[in-house]
Amino acid sequence: MTQTSTRPRRVSPAEVRARLGAPDAMVKEKILDHIDDEFRRFIAHSPFLVMATADAAGRADSSPRGDYPGFVKVLDEHTLAIPDRPGNRIADSFRNLAENDGIGLVFLVPGVRETLRVNGRAYPTDEPDVLARMQTEAKTPELAIIVEVAEAYGHCGRAIVRSRLWDPASRALADELPSAGEMFVTQLGLDIAPEVLDQTLEDSYRTLY
């Protein structure tokens, strides 16, 4: 018997607002149009962010970015620079930004429940002076993403608290998952031992820059 999927009912924006209610005045007031000293300090301590972009048709993509704390540079109160470190070379974010320059960032600091959200416009650069500021392990990135800040605000920690993300006990969840090698072998039908692929991935992680 073939199962047919049904799409859940779409809720209108008016219904969403009716159910959620209006945000407090303080919530609206906390949204800045620049990076102030407090946000600058948060970014300087952040080793990880999630970058959201979308193509011209609105198809969205989220990309993790990470490095030593402060890898994202605040060029001025309206401008950030994010180095492009070696990865899978798919370049989804760059392709999207070529079609749609909108960008959204979420900065995280280990152990901190609150996050920092930044929204704006972005584009890639190869400006030598900018890239030189991002040299790590004697390596300078080939490209950086410049973010022109439109909104910046702290996000409450309820999601982090509910997820128990920073709770050491949550690390046990990793033991319940297959290894990356096992997943790739199954998904791609590879004729290779999973532990061999796991070692290949482990070796690749030793070359981060």
Image (cartoon, rainbow, N blue to C red):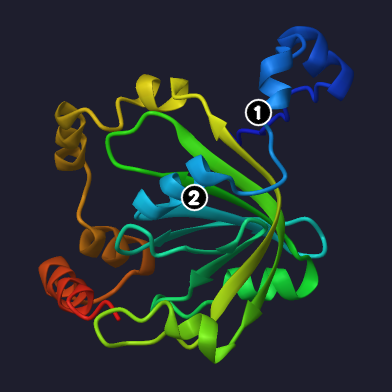
Note whether 60 is above or below 198 in the view shown: above
Reading the image, the residue beneath label 1 is 30
Residue 6 to residue 79: above or below: above
The label on residue 1 is none
Residue 104 against residue 32 in the figure, above or below: below
Residue 53 % position (x, y): 66, 59
Q: Residue at x 47, y 47 (%)?
A: 107
Where is mark 2, residue-wise?
A: 40
Q: Amino acid at mark 1?
A: Lys
The residue lying at 63 percent from left, 56 percent from top is: 77
Q: Position of residue 8 (x, y in %)?
A: 72, 24
Q: Badge 1, how many Cα within 10 Å: few under 14, some, many 20+?
A: few
Dot 2: few (<14), some (14–19), or many (≥20) neighbours within 10 Å?
Answer: some
Q: CA distance from mark 1 to mark 2?
A: 15 Å
Please identify the quadrant where the C terminus is shown.
Answer: bottom left
What residue is at 51 percent from the left and 68 percent from the top? 82
Disc 2 residue type (three-letter): Arg
Asked if residue 112 lies left or right of residue 94, the reply is left
Q: Image quadrant of residue 93?
A: bottom right
